[in-house]
Amino acid sequence: MAETFTADALPADKAARYALLRQEIAAVTEGEPDEVARMASVAAMLAQAFPSFFWTGFYRVDPAKEAELVVGPYQGTLGCLRIAFGRGVCGAAAARRQTVNVEDVEAFADHIACDSRSRSEIVVPVLDGKGRLIAVLDVDSTHLGAFDAVDAEGLEAIVRDVFGSDQS
Ligand code: SME
């Protein structure tokens, strides 16, 4: 299984790569009730499938705090631990419950620079089967304008599959 989702074994075309990755992630995470285990698997498989991704991971809604995200499973360099709703790109996606695609992080007024090498990023809200916001998925790139509608649709489909139905 391990080598089937590495970049070399996946199609070069981005939409086709997302389509295959989506199936492989669904197969790996299916039936796993632990949300953190599913998040860790998604972060690892995205990082392996897209070596150009500099940071892939989750910020979870902290149930003990009001409107605050706390870092969850990720692959990449050290991320900030906590982000308030409305702050940075992650906080904007959480507050709006909408995907936020930032082509140039320096042009995003409230961007939180966890690592100055990050130049563009896309953040997708993660909703559970009851429509509650449980986390956001953050993917960063060292290139400007790395993400487009294909990424948005691909990432949204993956989080819908893995977190949008009640697995517990
Ligand atoms: N840049 C993000 C913070 C998270 S890190 O990049 C891992 C933001 O502005 O929300």
Image (cartoon, rainbow, N blue to C red):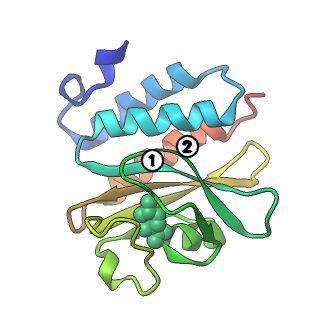
Q: Decide: marks 1, 2 in contact (CB < 8 A)?
A: yes
Residue at disc 1, CB closer than 8 Å to ligand 1? no
State which quarter of the image contains the C terminus: top right
Q: Is residue 30 above or below residue 154?
A: above
| Left or right: 150 as drawn, with respect to 112 | left
| Left or right: 168 as drawn, with respect to 163 | right
Q: Is residue 110 above or below residue 158?
A: below
Q: Is residue 33 visible?
A: yes
Residue at disc 2, CB closer than 8 Å to ligand 1? no
Q: Which amino acid does the dot numbered 2 rest on?
A: Val
Residue assigned mark 2: 159
| Residue 52: image location, x then y, percent | 23, 47
Could you say whether the residue bearing mark 1 is in a helix, strand or loop? helix
Q: Residue at x 64, y 39 (%)?
A: 163
| Residue 105: image location, x then y, percent | 33, 75
Q: Residues within 10 Å of mark 2 (few under 14, many from 20)?
A: many
Q: Is residue 26 above or below residue 165?
A: above
Q: Residue at x 51, y 20 (%)?
A: 28
Residue 149 or residue 50, whichever sits in front? 50
Residue assigned mark 1: 155
Which quadrant holds residue 107? Answer: bottom left
Q: Is residue 100 visible?
A: no
| Residue 134: image location, x then y, percent | 70, 52
Q: How many marks?
A: 2
Q: Residue at x 48, y 48 (%)?
A: 57
